[in-house]
Image (cartoon, helix red, strand yellow):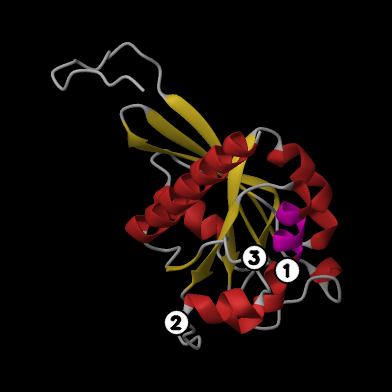
Amino acid sequence: MAFAPSDTRVDDDALPIALKILVAGGFGVGKTTMVGSVSEIQPLLTEEYLTDESIGVDDIVGVESKHTTTVAMDFGRITLNHDLVLYLFGTPGQDRFLFVWDELSLGAIGAVVLADTRRLAECFPSVDYFERRGTPFIVAVNCFDGASEYQPAEVQLALNLDAGVPVILCDARKRDSAKEALIALVEHAMKTAWGNSQEN
């Protein structure tokens, strides 16, 4: 492998590498919050108010104060450095919108699955989806106020995750914490891609 000399200048005209990342998880887990907190542009949000039509359809136990829901996607962008830009696509959380996921997943290098330990079962559909597709993902436990604290190893065991799937703690409201989760995903996706290339 060749390395460039340390005094080599960065080509300011070179286009950065753009990576597509999904932010997934159950209803009310903090996907919209994460995209909004970390995006360097005004995020595109497709939220609509919950109506009486959702009674008996959307499970709001544990998130009774939630009044809106994502019906298509959230979109944001973050530049990690001069040559790496992440495009974030937040998925809708309800099962009835799963058909949207196939379109959103096209070209994605991986996903951050947000988990709420008060409603851990809500992230099973996301975990199952990415496992079936062979898409690299990490689980980021969103540290909600008042929620019981668990160690990543406990969450990994509870979700029956493969030992190679990283589980981290994060606060989706805080930019630095959300950014760390995205970096962890990029590193995991690169490691997975490298491992797959070595096997072939």
Q: Considering the image in quadrants, where does the C terminus appear?
A: top right
Q: Which residues are magenta?
A: 125-131
Real-space Cα separation, disc 1 to disc 2, in angstroms: 22 Å
Separation of marks 1 and 3 at Cα, in angstroms: 13 Å
Which quadrant is home to the N terminus? top left
Quadrant location of residue 37? bottom left
Q: Which circle's residue, 1 or 3, is located before the other in the chain?
A: 1
Q: Answer with left or right where residue 102 lies relative to residue 62.
A: right
For the residues labelled 3 and 2, the Cα–Cα distance comes to 28 Å
Residue under the point 63% across and 39% down: 199
Q: Of the residues under marks 1 and 2, which one precedes in the sequence? A: 1
Instruction: Please tell me which of labels 3 and 2 falls first in the chain.
Output: 2
How dense is the environment of label 1, judged by Cα within 10 Å: few (below 14), some, or many (20 and up)? Answer: some
Q: Nearer the viewer, residue 46 or 101?
A: 101
* Front in this rendered view, residue 86 or 56: 86
| Dominant secondary-structure state across the stretch colored magenta | helix
Task: Depth check: give the residue in front, 80 or 60.
Answer: 80
- The three-letter code of the residue at mark 3 reads Asp
What residue did someone put label 1 on?
124
Residue at 43% over, 33% down: 85
Report if residue 192 lies within the magenta region. no
Secondary structure beneath label 2: loop
- Give x and y (percent) for residue 139: 56, 63
Res 145 label? 2
